Amino acid sequence: MEMSEQQKRPKFLNLLKIRMPIGAIVSIAHRFSGVILFMLIPFLIYILEISLKTEQGFQQLVEFFNRSDVRVVLLLIIWMFAHHLVNGIRLLLLDLDIGISRSASRLNSWLMILLGILITAFFAGVLL
Amino acid sequence: MTLHAHGLRAWLLQRMSALYMTGYTFFVLFLFSSASISDYQNWHSWMADPFFSLATTIFFAALLVHAWVGIRDVIMDYAHSSLLRFILLTATGLSLFSIGIWMLRVVILVVIK
């Protein structure tokens, strides 16, 4: 009886139809940025290696990172890193029961988005 | 409850590595905003400094641990077949391990030069 009632429940798995709360969006962004940053680790070590191996390699990297298209991509990476870092701090505070109430958690989620954008804007000012 | 309880050790490693990386990030930002890298020799001497190279090596160790726990969580959430899970976890673990060896090689070559 109860089972058949449950089976009749409509399922809305269309992500475009679900109105997600801000906490869910921030959580997805945290996971997405984390996976992208993970995939960038080999490039980071490669850059570190080239920059330290020879003086020519170092100069080539300087020229590479002076290109404006490269700097735009770099800014996107900085945004993902900044968002992941500040939201990570929010998650650490949640572990200490700070900002755990629904209203505080929603407000802080918006604040972390804003802070991530502000940090990116600061580096845009430095790099562009 | 011991640290071997399900997931607690991973949870703790995730947070401890996060704290270290946050500290390192602010430290490096402060360092390079007050003394910028002027040329290759300058950058090389930074990395050859025992304190800075050690702090950087610990950063990468924390990064690899952090990535392992995070990617492991993602794989376990989306890959339900145990074969797929095994393949993905093994591939991730092996890549992170080789990246760690590679990073150590980069630092050691700078320090002994």
Image (cartoon, grey):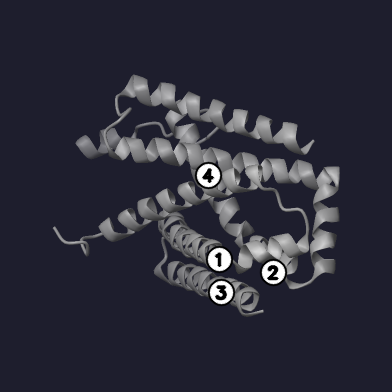
Element type at mark 2: helix
Mark 4: few, some, or many residues within 10 Å (few <14, many ≥20)?
few
| Marks 2, 4 in one chain | no
Given the image, on which type of amino acid does mark 4 rest?
Answer: Phe
Q: Quadrant of the C terminus of chain A?
A: top right
Given the image, on which type of amino acid does mark 1 rest?
Answer: Ser
Position of residue A20 relative to residue A103, above or below, is below
Distance in Å between CA atoms under marks 4 and 1: 16 Å
| Residue at position x 63%, y 39% in the image | A79
| Marks 4, 1 in one chain | yes
Q: Is residue A1 visible?
A: no
Residue position marked by numbered label 1 in the rendering? B53
Do the residues under discs 4 and 3 have CB atoms within 8 angstroms?
no
Mark sitting earlier along the chain (1/3):
1
Position of residue B111 relative to residue B40, above or below, is below
* Disc number lying in front (4 or 3): 4
| Residue at position x 64%, y 43% in the image | B34
**How far from the left and from the top, in percent, is residue A97?**
26, 33
Do the residues under discs 2 and 3 have CB atoms within 8 angstroms?
no
Mark 2 — on which chain does it sit?
Answer: A
Residue position marked by numbered label 2 in the rendering? A49
| Marks 4, 3 in one chain | yes
Mark 1: few, some, or many residues within 10 Å (few <14, many ≥20)?
some
| Residue at position x 47%, y 65% in the image | B61
Residue position marked by numbered label 3 in the rendering? B104
